[in-house]
């Protein structure tokens, strides 16, 4: 089902679906959900524009937050950061945005641009720059498809503003990451601006509508995670994602997590209920690589999602707790990430893992 | 002797005097010295403006480099960073600079603004923002006297540009430090712009002329460091600095130095020739605290300078080598740093040392 607008009543489903697609990252959406619900209740729905309908001369500005997801639980947004970033971006470039778009359909970043779209009465594109969440800016499909990262504007909850001009995508990622570290761990940026012509190629399409549909299924219905697997598999079967596969069911027996250089990094261990060998999941903001011993069960860019076993709800990494009973899922990534140029940015070796990418599907 | 302009023939003396006043930091001036000498040979002398003659409506822009001094030995400047920073600063603020000024009369930062002043044909103020070198932006007299750090522009040797707008001096320091880390370890900034009225209060006056005079004495004459002490003491006796005092003569018996968070931090140990207990000097870009056991010999904001014992030349920290024979000097700081509001930014406790400041003089 393709939505042509997004209303207060869609936001809870959008957030829940986005936590599922966030593969552990994207930032906790709770506070942003409340802010967006209030904005849409006050000002009405935000129009959604389908990627394929964008005119060549549209001017699409991605807006989102950058930082370690754990910080999103402690450093709360003021709510006006997205529109401040947009205002300053437009003032610096002298050009008004026709549309906004999300960095990633993951956690808080799915709803962050809605705050600016609502405040300014402009449409949001039904799509995003990852089709999931990933930790670094150069991993966005915008960047992979050649959109320049800057001019970019970074703001914080105190209204401090930084404007960046650099053409190197990896340097840009280093800069915004270090700025996030300096500015309390979380900043909001407007960046990777693109024309409609570029956007049609660079945006993963339809992901907002998909996340709402997925979220409605997660929020409704009965049964534990295993019982609801067929229902979830059916949603993905008709999508641009690959097959959904249960990888392991067990208990979180270890959780090693630190905030390093502006990222949450670490590893979690699942002790399977069937007594088989432990499964480890490596983390860098997102769940990236699931292994049983040396055997790779699934890896980035395919999606890894942890569901709470009893409630069947997705768990973002900053809410993981020792002893939780979980179902680990692997899901094939959207086609944007199956190309050689995309894999050069997001294959397991890009994260320092000494394994090749073997598609799950 | 007060200079009214600075020529090619002054630069070697300026750099040598600045390394002395840099108390170990400020960055190695060698490459900047060559760049400035070439600029002044081509375009002629740069006019110097005395602080007290600045008109109220002058618009004075400090320009300098930010980063760990060790990096200055490896990441060489392109040479056009200072004028690029100035150009972008003026374009962002819509106001032309009437004068430039140095962050610190220390190492490379004494000569960096000469590159922009020469390229643009505008005068440099005879003075600086520290009267020595210190590691952090909020420690500059500009900041202590209430000049806002931003708008500020940071550039690197590749021409990447970052514009900052933040009013908090400590946050600003964190931002530029983290940007330096992201951008290869060294950036050039234009910041803390001030009117002539502010500049007359906020600038430590006459330090460029003083550094040239000091440098001429260091470069000329005969004798080892101990023999030349009376000559050096005489230069300081007639200055705004306090007394110059030899603290210890010995051999560098230990050198513990790392680059952490964009700073060079560590400690060096001097084994005195007279067999007395070892003297340690704590380092954070600059030499900050000299102790013999628990006894404080001298501390920031007073100056600590290491001279090579045989040549009587000052040694910046990134050029220290195990086994060097040195004379450690303590020198009273300029009056700008003896006020309560200045000590709130630069006393030993601001660097994490659990000691009070006891003036050397």
Image (tube, coloured by chain):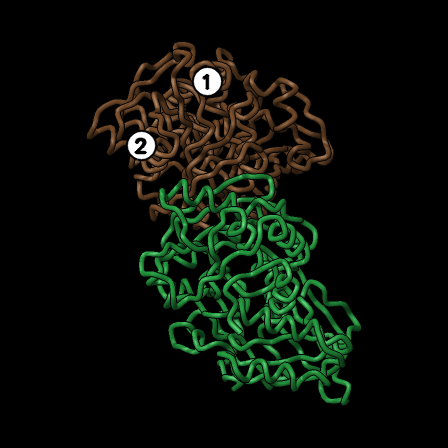
Chain colours: A green, B brown
Residue B325: assigned label: none
Secondary structure under badge 1?
A: helix
Up/down of B60 relative to B327, above or below: above
The front one of B232 and A53 is A53
Question: Are there few (<14), some (14-19), or many (20+) residues within 10 Å of tag 2?
Answer: many
Pointer 2 chain: B
* Furthest-front residue in this view: A44
- Quadrant of the drawing holding the N terminus of chain B: top left
Q: Look at discs 1 and 2 and give the one toward the viewer.
A: 1
Residue B199: assigned label: 1
Up/down of B135 relative to A343, above or below: above
Q: Gap between marks 1 and 2, in whole Å? A: 21 Å
In the image, residue A18 lies at what x, y percent?
Answer: 60, 67
Question: Are there few (<14), some (14-19), or many (20+) residues within 10 Å of tag 1?
Answer: many
- Asked if one can make out residue B26 in the rendered structure from this viewpoint, the answer is yes
- Quadrant of the drawing holding the C terminus of chain B: top right
Secondary structure under badge 2?
A: helix
In the image, residue B158 lies at what x, y percent?
Answer: 34, 48
In the picture provided, is B78 more to the left or to the right than B290?
Answer: left
Q: Which residue is mark 2?
A: B115
- Asked if one can make out residue A261 in the rendered structure from this viewpoint, the answer is no
Up/down of B158 relative to B135, above or below: below
* Furthest-left residue in this view: B42
Up/down of B355 relative to A286, above or below: above
In the image, residue B7 lies at what x, y percent?
Answer: 27, 23
């Amino acid at each position: 089902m393709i939505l042509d607008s997004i209303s207060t009543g869609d936001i809870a489903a959008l957030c829940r679906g986005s936590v599922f697609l966030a593969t552990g990252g994207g930032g906790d959406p709770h506070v942003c959900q409340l802010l967006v619900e209030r904005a849409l209740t006050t000002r009405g729905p935000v129009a959604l524009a389908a990627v394929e309908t964008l005119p060549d001369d549209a001017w699409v500005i991605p807006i989102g937050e950058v930082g370690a997801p754990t910080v999103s639980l402690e450093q709360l947004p003021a709510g006006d950061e997205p529109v401040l970033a947009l205002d300053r971006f437009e003032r610096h470039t002298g050009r008004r945005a026709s549309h906004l778009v999300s960095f990633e359909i993951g956690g808080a970043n799915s709803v962050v641009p809605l705050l600016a779209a609502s405040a300014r009465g402009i449409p949001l594109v039904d799509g995003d720059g990852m089709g999931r969440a990933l930790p670094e800016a150069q991993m966005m499909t915008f960047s992979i498809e050649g959109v320049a990262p800057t001019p970019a504007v970074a703001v914080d909850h105190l209204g401090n503003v930084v404007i960046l001009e650099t053409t190197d995508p990896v340097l840009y990622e280093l800069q915004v990451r270090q700025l996030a570290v300096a500015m309390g761990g979380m900043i909001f940026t407007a960046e990777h601006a693109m024309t409609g012509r570029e956007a049609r190629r660079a945006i993963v399409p339809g992901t907002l509508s998909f996340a709402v549909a997925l979220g409605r299924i997660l929020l409704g219905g009965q049964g534990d995670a295993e019982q609801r697997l067929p229902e979830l598999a059916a949603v993905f079967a008709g999508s641009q994602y690959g097959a959904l596969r249960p990888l392991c069911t067990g208990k979180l027996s270890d959780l090693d997590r630190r905030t390093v250089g502006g990222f949450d990094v670490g590893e979690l261990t699942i002790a399977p209920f069937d007594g088989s060998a432990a499964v480890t999941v490596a983390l860098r903001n997102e769940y990236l690589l699931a292994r049983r011993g040396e055997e790779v069960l699934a890896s980035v860019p395919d999606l890894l999602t942890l569901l709470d076993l009893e409630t069947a709800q997705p768990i973002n990494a900053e809410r993981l707790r020792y002893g939780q009973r979980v179902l680990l899922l692997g899901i094939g990534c959207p086609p944007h990430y199956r190309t050689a140029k995309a894999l050069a940015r997001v294959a397991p070796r890009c994260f320092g893992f000494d394994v090749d990418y073997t598609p799950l599907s």
